[in-house]
Amino acid sequence: MKNVLRLLPLLPGIVTLSGCNHAPQKSNGQNSQKPNIIYIFADDLGIGDLSCYGATKVSTPNIDRLAGQGVQFTNAYATSATSTPSRFGLLTGMYPWRQENTGIAPGNSELIIDTACVTMADMLKDAGYTTAAVGKWHLGLGPKGETDFNNRITPNAQSIGFDYEFIIPATVDRVPCVFVENGHVVGLDPNDPITVSYDHKVGNWPTGEENPELVTLKPSQGHNNTIINGIPRIGWMTGGKSALWKDEDIADIITHKAKNFIASHQEEPFFLYMGTQDVHVPRIPHPRFAGKSGLGTRGDVIMQLDWTIGEIMHTLDSLHIADNTILIFTSDNGPVIDDGYQDHAYELLNGHTPMGIYRGGKYSAYEAGTRVPFIVRWPARVKPNKQQALFSQIDVYASLASLLDQPLRKGAAPDSQEHLSVLLGKNNTNREYVVQQNLNNTLAIIKGQWKYIEPSDAPAIEYWTKMELGNDKQPQLYDLSSDPSEKTDVSKQYPDIVKELAELLESVKEK
Ligand code: NG6
Ligand code: CA
């Protein structure tokens, strides 16, 4: 089914959809207008972190409601096991490992998506959408060399298809700890300019390394540079005091901005790309969630994340646009328990299993690295459903283009395939294969029941987190149908399958 909209019965008086910028009408069950699209990337959320995916120690009622009203995937994959490449893959429709500099970006990285690239946001603009990026960005800002946070930062998200941006430049554990709105640091006093370095100390603000007695949250790994709000970060900064965020308020602020964007564009098709900082470290819940989960701050920020999703859902309900809004909720990569601060996440797990039954986690080529929660709700067109088909986030771009009958511009989204009917839960055909990428760019490929991980000289264990990365000098093969937890490498028993999948992976690389 190439285009669902084309199959809609045309109601009398309704303009055809292709390329139309007709006077908008609220959906109110008519669904004549192009659907709004909201894509929410949670950060480091595991497939075992939600009650709708079987978690019993935490409760996520809003996300559960979303799943109950939508298509809930069990075999959906992020492109990569870390944030920057995963986000790059989604927005460009190109595997990040085809381009250098797509690894975890520092806070002063240049914008790593070429402004000439036709992103998913560009495609949606071509289709008549108003677009926004809100929350975690982590794709760099500004030109190569140095991001100047004191003047209009360009290129920014607006240079690659977003009409509006309100973003956290990198991650919440990285400087600068400020929001950027349409190229400007929010609340910056020009007399107190920002300096950032990822190479050496700048200014005289205390660091975790020199003044450990000043921190309120101690690092467990790294994270010992400039202290902001009592939290030692990755990277050094000075200046911009009036612009610094308060970690407790980030969820409230980005949720507010997302809601504002939705409300101001309720009369036209809009695309909202939202990245939450939850549940990445440092996990700092607002006081109304602090201590509420009983699982420490990691559990508390899962509750905070669930609240955020609830707020977005309530906003859509109150504006009467939920029916014709496609709301996709997922994660950029798999979970990690201790990712650099002494927040006692391990000790407080209390039997909670963020990875579910899967091996590895964030950074890893094993399943928990990239197999993520993925929920698609579109009440007007999509019946609640469980979806077991193999699906990759790399295909969201081409699938949405197909939905909107929007031709892809030349060279756009080279790795994205159209799997619209799978995305909408109308068909459960597996993608022929899914490619996974770990921290070290080691690739794995899943086809049918088999998963092959290519040989790699990179370390087997991640230095800081002790996470199993899935790297081995020998090729590995797992039968996910009988062994979804990847306990037994069967490469020696099935040399022909190893060869077939190795060749398939090479052909994808050479494409
Ligand atoms: C790692 C950080 C980790 C996290 C990650 C990026 C250390 C020791 N670890 O290098 O805390 O920031 O990068 O996470 O510094 S991601 O989800 O944005 O990819
Ligand atoms: Ca992440």
Image (spheres, rainbow, N blue to C red):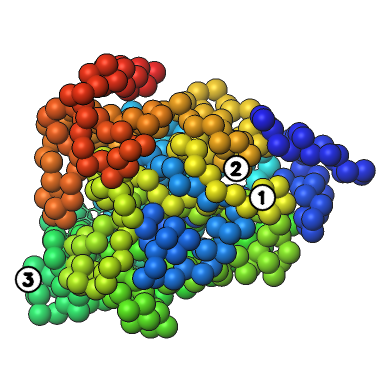
Q: Residue at x 37, y 81 (%)?
A: 292
Q: Is tag 1's residue or tag 3's residue first in the polypeptide sequence?
A: 3
Visible residue check, residue 506: no
The amino acid beneath tag 3 is Glu
Q: Which image quarter is the N terminus in?
A: top right
Q: Which of the four quarters of the rendered structure image does ligand 1 lie in?
A: bottom left
Question: Is disc 3 placed on a helix, strand or loop?
Answer: loop
Give the foreground label among 1 and 3.
1
Q: Which residue in the protein does label 1 denote?
A: 383
Q: Residue at x 80, y 46 (%)?
A: 32
Q: Are marks 1 and 2 in contact (CB under 8 Å)?
A: yes
Extreme right residue here? 12
Q: Nearer the viewer, residue 437 or 262?
A: 437
73 relative to 194, above or below: above
Q: Which residue in the protein does label 3 denote?
A: 210
Q: Residue at x 49, y 47 (%)?
A: 73
The amino acid beneath tag 2 is Gly
Residue 280 location, x and y as percent?
Answer: 32, 61
Q: Which residue in the protein does label 2 denote?
A: 425
